[in-house]
Image (cartoon, grey):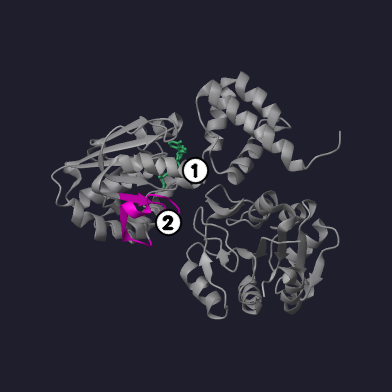
Amino acid sequence: MDFKIVVIGASLGGLNAVQTILSALPKNLPVAVAIGQHRHRSSDGELIRYLQETSVLPVREAEDKQPINPGIVFLAPADYHLLVEPGYFALSKDAPVTFARPSIDVLFESAADAYEEQVIGIILTGASSDGAKGLAKIQAYGGTVIVQKPDTAECPIMPEAAIKAVKMPQILPLAEIVPFLNSQIKSQILI
Amino acid sequence: MSPRHPNELEDIEIKLLLEGIYLYYGFDFRDYAMASLKRRIWNIIHAENVHTVSGLQEKVLHDPACMERFLLSLSVNVTSMFRDPSFYIAFRDKAIPVLRTYPFIRIWHAGCSTGEEVYSLAILMFEEGLYHRCRIYATDMNEAVLRKAKAGIIPLDLMQEYTQFYLQAGGKSDFSEYYTAAYNGALIRSFLRENIVFSPHNLVTDASFNEFNVILCRNVLIYFNRSLQERVHKLLYESLRTFGILGLGKHETMKTTAYENHYEELDSDEKIYRRIA
Ligand SMILES: C[S@@+](CC[C@H](N)C(=O)[O-])C[C@H]1O[C@@H](n2cnc3c(N)ncnc32)[C@H](O)[C@@H]1O
């Protein structure tokens, strides 16, 4: 299986969790990473700097119609939805979904639509049910789904909602997510 | 027959719906960005109490009132006064010095929605002492939002937030000088409306109608796919004088288009460009 994109959803407590994941990702990652992190409207620059500090991959705020290139981490800009189209990202200011913009469901559902079984979806800590529907769609379209083990999450509500919505996800403590990811995409890494 | 991928039928139905609307009503959504368009179409399907895209197609084609609702729900009309205040700061710093040298300034707001952006820039030009030199054209494909824009009445409960944005945008005066409270709304003062013409124009199907010194097309192109963006960039380019100024939305970029080399960046964070060739 050749994966194209890893989509990550995080809310309350997500900054540390996302940082932990990004700092463990290897150089030359053969897939793109897109992150929907709920946060305050005007916190973009700092967040990118914070995540970039500990990651070997370039971390960028996604721009409209930017190509989905492997080895890059794209962050949904504050107060915009981030959507995946075949080959590129799109942004929108549609109304918040489940009170969230960026909405994790919007990111995940569009990723499933565009890349079907070539998507890996990861739900991390959070105090909402956003992402559960999206993760279910990724699974229904043949993608791989991972949820942070709720008792290791700063806030277990979002992982618990996601676990309820899908069949037999990989439920992993934070530290084991990247090793599992690597095992999934290992064969794609060019030597 | 064997079951196919769930996506496949949906994609066909959406194609048919958009084709039908284009053939019958003339509105061309065929090259809008598909992922967000699809979500909006499903929202409309639920609101109209039908169950499939084909069900919506029948209703939209046979019921013009449904088409009007469709138009309103399909386009995202959210806007605000001094949206992204840092854009207006950059415009004052980088664009105004250029515009000061012109005896006459023609401005086009393409996709102006309910007009908040138009009145914001009008206020800025007034404060820079340039408003009397301006002729402002504000267009949108949607006549319902244009009617609101023309009325110039902003809901009063929003004015507190807009006052904050106005100050963050480098406003030089007292924001309340620019409107009078009326009918539960804030009515934009008439001196600010004098030089503005609102009219319908569709960026997909209508041609260039003038040459401008400034074009703002903010938060409109994000709803188009790449090939349509390219076509509309051509239209904007052809409507802009050499050395004219183009302002895009905060997360829109010139980089993915063939027109990149025709512009220089006046402010890369705020997406303010100047046509150089
Ligand atoms: C989000 S609003 C942007 C308003 C304002 N420019 C701003 O940035 O706040 C987008 C507007 O684009 C308009 N629009 C969408 N497609 C269009 C088209 N093909 N031609 C003209 N206007 C269009 C919509 O009707 C909507 O009012």
Callout count: 2
**Sequence order check, earlier mark of 1 and 2:** 1
In the rendered view, tell whether residue A99 sits above or below residue B205: below
Magenta segment includes B251: yes
Name which residue lies at 59% across and 41% down. Answer: B37
Q: Which residue is mark 2?
A: B255
Q: Seen in the image, is A113 located left or right of residue A171?
A: left
Amino acid found under the numbered disc labelled 2:
Lys
User: Furthest-top residue in view?
Assistant: B62
| Residue A131 visible in the displayed image | yes
Would residue B275 be counted in the magenta stretch? no
The residue nearer to you, when weighing B210 against A97, is B210
First to last magenta residue range: B246-269
Ligand 1 is located in which of the four quadrants?
A: top left
Q: Which residue is mark 1?
A: B227
Q: Residue at x 62, y 75 (%)?
A: A22
Q: Residues within 10 Å of mark 1 (few under 14, many from 20)?
A: few
Q: Nearer the viewer, residue B125 or B266?
A: B266
Q: Are marks 1 and 2 in contact (CB under 8 Å)?
A: no
Residue found 53% across the figure and 64% down from its top = A40
- Name the quarter where the N terminus of chain B is drawn: top right
Q: Where in the figure is residue B251, as x and y percent of width and height?
A: 45, 56
Instruction: Tell me if mark 2 has few (under 14), some (14-19) or many (20+) residues whose alpha carbon lies within 10 angstroms of its own.
Output: few
Image quadrant assignment for residue B34: top right
Q: Residue furthest front?
A: A191
Separation (CA) of disc 1 from disc 2: 14 Å
Q: Position of residue A114 (x, y in %)?
A: 66, 50
Residue in the image at 57% along x and 47% along y: A95
Q: Is residue B186 visible?
A: no
